[in-house]
Image: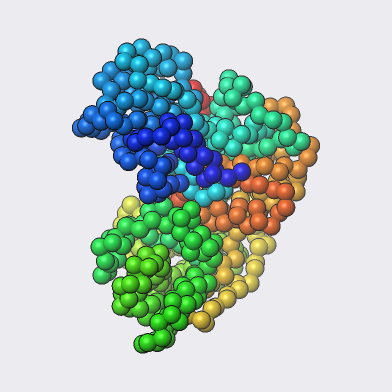
Amino acid sequence: MNVTLAVKQYISKMIENSGPGMKVLLMDKETTSIVSVVYTQSEILQKEVYLFERIDSQNRDSMKHLKAICFLRPTKENVQHLIQELRRPKYSVYFIYFSNVISKSEIKSLAEADEQEVVAEVQEFYGDFIAVNPHLFSLNLQGVSRGRTWEPTMLSRCTQGLTSVLLALKKCPMIRYQLSSDMAKNLAENVKRIITKEYELFDFRKTEVPPLLLILDRSDDAITPLLNQWTYQAMVHELLGLNNNRIDLSRVPGISKDLREVVLSAENDEFYANNLYLNFGEIGTNIKNLMEDFQKKKPKGQQKLESIADMKAFVDNYPQFKKMSGTVSKHVTVVGELSRLVSERQLMEVSEVEQELACQNDHSSAQQNVRRLLQNPRVSELDAVRLVMLYALRYERHSSSILPSLMEELSRRGVSERYRRMVQSVVEYGGKRIRGSDLITPTDAVAITKQFFKGLKGVENVYTQHQPLLHDTLDQLIKGRLKDSQFPYLGASSLRDRPQDIMVFVIGGATYEEALTVFNLNRNTPGIRIVLGGSAIHNTKSFLEEVMLASSHSGDRAQGSGRHSTRR
């Protein structure tokens, strides 16, 4: 169960099917992202694809010496663009691949437009999702809900994305969903409807234990996407923002031209692949080791690498090293910027209080610590608001809650009204009234444990005690103890055996911390294969955007109203 491999195989097969000769790859906005996340341009160039074009681009030249491979989502707009293209073909022959199921009537329209008989083949290749890691996929959607119900176009897109993942992995699953969420039930029913309608596509070889699809709602755990992160991939997304494996570093002080945008992809960056899930201290140590290995080859001017700043100086002073390893200069820059932000925003202290709020139940200590940090001018606006949100979720119904006075403190700090309004919106989105699970258990008082690596100044390694709710849900599921009363099966049948192949989808977005949980469960539980997906992969900023988009429609909050939006 490897989503990255599934998409790569589809793309390789498209290119192979077109035979030898020079080719152009025609894509739309979404399929461009789908391809770029699993293949680099240079890898595709080696397969004789010399040109990459958008189907909606008006000013493409006619190049009759090229074969066209079209990889497109089956939308009405794309079908229209293709019809226009086939009426006046710019290339010698067309191999057309849709990323999902396309209707017979649309195939007929394309056939009618192909008067010059340039179409060699039309096929469905189910790569209708972004394969972020081998066990993690995203649909890159923001704002999937209106209050507690679906935005109708988003329900349709999530249904398509999820069914394409099932087809790509060749799974026809039993479905369980979170009972407390109407949206989860709507999506489960829609996926089931497609499986029934397209039963021939889903006719895979039966396994002893059927695969399982579990559909969850982000609102059941609003704490995980609010926490600062300390493992490499999650931290990069939280502090710098990962968008289709790209990071924008243009705002980094003194950044060189070639590092303004960098790509972090485990598929073709060995250091990143090895350090993806390691924490900040270990990464610092690993970069230091890498640099020292290189220094051994250069006996002159031996210098000690004590801090990230020393490393940056070292890389800048060795242009030939930069040439040999763009990878290292990239990671030194990224880790250097993470380190600068950690120290500038005092994230070690902030994170310690976040962890206490997420995992412990000591109200008097929590209120003192939150208040102390709100009065610290070096704590950023976002971090101040996130601490108040975590306090509001944790002590929502506490008899001595000091939330009103914390809100006043935010006001005094000059925090914008938009950010202050978000505190209430987060509680409405993921508060006690909404949740179907025990996100917060009062007895969960764990002593905070810290580990520090002293190997590298400027990079501290923190042990974070928080486990996402998803960890418990999957743990119960694997042990066969997940309650049917909270996560019912869709339909009459249920699994007698413990599941082995599990696909989890989080409506409202998953996080890299949850991806780490799935990675560890896959590694430590023999016989279990889990793939995680979400309508998006959130950091705190994008999660708060999701919450605000949902709450701006919260007039539609009537409980059952979600059931009307299943068909578009």
Where residue 486 sits in the image (x, y, percent)? 67, 40
- Choose top left, top right, bottom left or bottom right for residue 113: top left
- Choose top left, top right, bottom left or bottom right for residue 18: top left
Q: The C terminus appears in which quarter of the rendering?
A: top left
- Of the pair 383 and 103, the residue shown nearer to us: 103
Where residue 535 sits in the image (x, y, percent)? 48, 41
- Choose top left, top right, bottom left or bottom right for residue 384: bottom left
Furthest residue to the front? 20
- Residue at 48% over, 53% down: 267
Left or right, residue 157 beside residue 502: left
Regarding residue 194, the answer to whether it shows in the image is yes
- Residue at 50% over, 72% down: 286
- Of the pair 473 and 212, the residue shown nearer to us: 212
Where residue 210 sits in the image (x, y, percent)? 71, 35
- Of the pair 557 and 123, the residue shown nearer to us: 123
Left or right, residue 138 beside residue 418: right
Q: The N terminus appears in which quarter of the rendering?
A: top right
* Residue 442, above or below 169: below
Regarding residue 232, the answer to whether it shows in the image is no
